[in-house]
Image: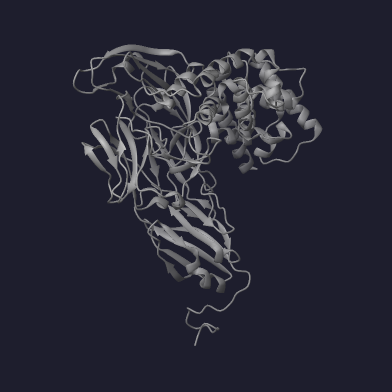
Amino acid sequence: MRAVLTAARDAHGLLDLCERAWAPALRGRVLVAEAEPERHGDLLAAASTALSGQDADTAAERWPASLLMAVVGTVCSRYCRGSVWGVWWRACGGRKPSFVVAEAWDCAFRNALSSFGLPVFAELSADDALLVHAGVPDAFLEELCSTLVGDTGKQASRPVALLLGRPEAAAFLARCRNAMVAIRDSATTEDTEDTEDTQDTQDTEAAEIPQRLAKAMARFRAGRDHRGAAAGSALAIEPFGRGPLLVGADGLGVPATAAVKTGRLYVFSQDGVLVPEDVALSPGPAWLLYPVGAAPEAEGKLVVIAHGSLPLRWAGWSLVEADLRDVAWLRSREPGAARRVVGGRSKPVLVTGKPVQGLSHGAGRPVVVDAPVLRLPAGEVEWSVEVRGHGGGVLARERVRGAPETATETSGFWRRVPRPLLGQYSVRVGGANGPGLVRTVVVAEGLGIHWHPDVRLLRPDGLEPAEAVFHPGAGMTTVPAGLTFGTDRARLPVEAVTRQHREVFLVEPPRMRVRVDGGAYDHDAEAIRPPRLTTAGLAVAGRIFVELPGLARPPELDVVAGGRVVQRVRPHRDGGYNLRRILDTVAFHSDTVLRLVHDGREATVAWIHAPEPSQDPWLPGTTGAGRG
C-alpha cells in the first residue's frame, strides 16, 4: 500500500509541474497544436502515463493543460491511421478502453478545452475533434505542404481535409500559407547571397507556426529545389549529444554506424547540417569530422574553437568546431581529395558555449548556462539585433556597429532582457549588406548540476540509483532542489523558477548504454536494463557496443558463468566487441553474463541464454569433441 501511495504522489507531483509549465502556452490559442506539445518529448510520455492512471473527470479538472498537451502531442507524433484516441492509449501501455471509459475521456478532453476557451468542435466525433486540434499529425505534413502551394492532384486525407474544412482554423492556415508562398516562387531560383536554411528559418519563424511544420516546409522546399539533397537519409551531427546521425524524411535521427564512414572529412554547419561536397563553405564556425591524426589541410589560419564528443562507435575519429574566416580552402589528407573552397560573405554567429551535460529542454534541445555571445563579421556595418521569448514577444532590440578591420563580439543586448536568463530565446540579426542570422537557444543562466555517481552503470535490475543536486545561480531556484533516480528511471523533470518565468527541463544523469548491431537483435540503446540474448542468433549477430561517458577506450568484457570468469573479450578499434568470439563459450553454459568493471564497480552488459548445454572445448575438466 505504501508503494502505491508513493507512486500516486509522484504522478501528482509530475502533473502539477507540467500544469504550471504548460497552462500559459495554451492561453490565447485556437488549436492545441499551436502550443507545440510535441516539443516536450519524453516529458509528454511521462505525463501520459501519469494521466492514464487517473480518473478522467479529475484529470480534466485538476490538470487540463497536461491532458490537452499529452494527448495532442502524442497524436501529432504517432498517428498514421485508425483510431486517433487509440494512439494515446497504446502510448500509455494500456488496452482499448470500454465504450463508457472512452466516452468519459472524450468528455474530459472537451471540458479541458473549454477551460482554456478553445473550440470543442461539438459537432465532430471524438477522433475528429482530436485530429483538428493536432493541426495535422507528422505523417501528413508533406501532404499539407503540397496542398498549401496548390498541388491538389489527389483527394485530401482525413486529417488534412478536417483541418481545411474548419473555419476556426482559418487564421492558423493563413499563417501556414504565408510561410509557403516562397516555395512556389523560388523553386527554380538560385540565391547566392543567403543560405537556403537561413531563408527558410526566417520565412517560417516569422509566420509563428509550430516548429515541426516549419521543418516540414523546409524539407518540402528542398525536395522541390533542383539543388535538393539526394534521396534517402542525410548525415547530421549532434556535437555534444548522440554524435553523427542519419536523418530521414521525417526529421528524426538515428545513430550513424561505421557503414556511413565512406569519406575522410565531413563538414557540418553550426546547427549540425551536413554541407554537401559541391557547395562552398561559409566563412565562420563549422564542425569538422575526420580520422584521428588526419586533420584536414588548409590554406590560411584554421582556428579550433571547441572539441565535440563522439560515441564509442566513432572511436578513432575527431570532432572539432573550427573558425573558417581566415581559410581559403580545406581538404582531406586522403590522396586525391578535392579542395573544399571557403567563399561568400561572413555572417553573424551566435557563440553559445558547451551545453550542460544531462539537461535538456522539450524534445532534446541542449541547455546552456551562459548568455550567448554575438560575433559580427569585420566591417563598418550597422546590425539590428532582436531577442524574442518563447511566446514570440520582443524582449530586446538594439543596433550594433561592427569594427572596420576585426570581428566584433558583444553580449550587451542581453542587458535589456530580465536576468537571470531562463527559457527559450530567439536571436535575430539583420544587416543592410549581408546575410543575417536566426538562432534559437535555451538558457538556464548559472545553473549547475552535481551528479553522484558520475556515470550510472547497468545492473541486472536496471540502472544504478543516482542523485542530482542542483546549484542555481543568483535569482533562480529549482523545484525540487535535488532528484533521486531509482533503478527504473533514466530521466526526471525539474522546474527552474525566476521572478519572471518558470521552465521545466528534463534531467538525465550520464549513464551507460549498450547497443547490439546485426543479427536478430535490435536492442534499444536507450533501454534501462541489459539486453537478453540467446545463442540461437549469436552466430549471425554483429557486435555489441558499450558507451560510457568520458571513457576514451572501453575496457575488456568478462564472460561470467557459474560465478567465475570463463573468457575475456577485447574491444575492436571502433569500440565494438565481436559476439562471434564468445559463441563456443556461451553455447556450453545455460546462462552467461557479459560484465565489465568501471571505476571499481561491476556493470552488467548483457545476459545470454543457451537452451541446450554442450561441451566447452576451452575449459579444463570437461570433455567434448573439441578436446584431444
**Is residue 185 positioned above or below 341 on the image?**
above
Name the residue at the bottom extreme. Answer: 628
Q: Position of residue 130 (x, y in %)?
A: 69, 25
**Residue at the left extreme?**
405
Q: Nearer the viewer, residue 484 or 460?
A: 460
The residue that appears at 40% across and 63% down in the rendered structure is 556
Residue 235 shows in this picture: yes
Q: Residue at x 55, y 66 (%)?
A: 539
**Camera-nearest residue between 26 and 448:** 26
Task: Choose top left, top right, bottom left or bottom right for residue 280.
Answer: top left
> Could you tell me if residue 63 is visible in this image?
no
For the residue pair 350 and 567, the one nearer the viewer reads as 350
Residue 515 in the figure: left or right of residue 397: right
The mark total stands at: 0
**Colouring of the image:** one colour
The vertical placement of 621 against 438, above or below, is below
Q: Looking at the figure, which quarter contains the N terminus?
A: top right
- Residue at left offset 61%, top offset 66%: 536
Residue 85 is left or right of residue 479, and the answer is right
**In the image, residue 528 lies at what x, y percent?**
53, 49
Residue appearing at x 60%, y 26% in the figure:
69
Q: Position of residue 213 (x, y in %)?
A: 55, 25
Percent coordinates x, y for residue 480 in the rendering = 47, 32
